[in-house]
Amino acid sequence: MALPIAVLVSGSGSNLQALIDRIEQGALDARIALVLSNKEGAYGLERARKHRLPHVCIPHADYPDRAEFDRAMIRAIRKAGGEAVVMAGFMRMITGEFLRAFPGKVINIHPALLPSFPGVHGPRDAADYGVAISGCTVHFVDEIMDHGPVIIQAAVPAYPEDDGQTLGGRILACEHRVLPQAVQWLATDRLRLEGRKVRVQPAPVPKAGEVPGALVNPPLELGF
Ligand code: GAR
């Protein structure tokens, strides 16, 4: 059965769109039980509307503190039947109470190779630093910002000409590939936590007619 997920957004929601697309293609064994934004006017809400997905805006400014805001989110997610939470461009820290409501089932995508460049300006900070390689990280969420165990990372080159926007755009294209993959592993119970380390259980043997994962060398180029 498809895992019911809540997707938390604060902005454009292009990562949400990547999840929607993979689900609609039948590649992802999850269903979006709720799209939740803390920002009115977030384009992620519009994407949810377009795809007739349940969505809600819970502005954090309407709540006296983080604890009350998180309780409102927990209530909305439970009411919608969400069992796992994907933070996809959600620009708020969450509380331990929220994490305990969905134990082992809260993941986040961050646009940098953690533990480098945590925070809200990952690509800009990496570009300003002058790194030659950056990327993105999907990780389990814990109570420290951008800190939990790493599920998957992807690297992209960074160039001296880059600023946060150009590097961020290159990273975002990678995010759209690795986030659905991480959610698929979560949805099919393939992730095992060993301390800080995440082990991905081997893929099941492909059924007849399915294309198996294959080692290709020289690597396939874009579009093939
Ligand atoms: C993405 O790059 C995501 O990794 C980042 O916000 C962007 C949201 O884009 N998240 C963070 O920086 C969290 N610290 P999207 O709304 O188009 O998915």
Image (spheres, grey):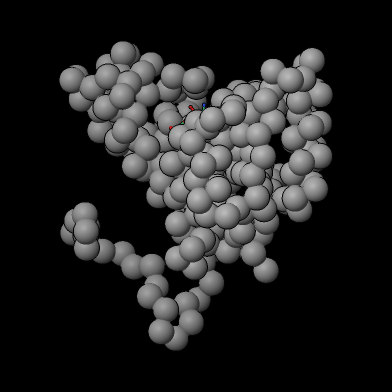
Q: In which quarter of the image is residue 175?
A: top left
- In the image, residue 106 sits, relative to residue 184, either above or below, namely above
Q: Quadrant of residue 220?
A: bottom left
Q: Where is residue 79 in the image (x, y as percent from the top left)?
A: 80, 48
- In the image, residue 70 sits, relative to residue 25, either above or below, namely above
Q: Name the residue rendered at 69%, 31% in the picture.
A: 58
- In the image, residue 24 sits, relative to residue 152, either above or below, namely below
Position of residue 143 in the picture relative to residue 78 (left or right): left
Q: Name the residue rendered at 46%, 48% in the picture.
A: 17
Q: Position of residue 132 (x, y in %)?
A: 25, 25
Q: Name the residue rendered at 31%, 33% in the picture.
A: 169
Q: Name the residue rendered at 41%, 84% in the picture.
A: 209
Position of residue 14 in the picture relative to residue 185 (left or right): left
* Quadrant in which the N terminus is drawn: bottom right
Position of residue 33 in the picture relative to residue 64 (left or right): left
Please tell me which residue lies in front, 32 or 118.
32
* Quadrant in which the C terminus is drawn: bottom left
Asked if residue 42 can be seen in this view, the reply is yes
Asked if residue 87 can be seen in this view, the reply is no
Q: Position of residue 192 (x, y in %)?
A: 64, 52
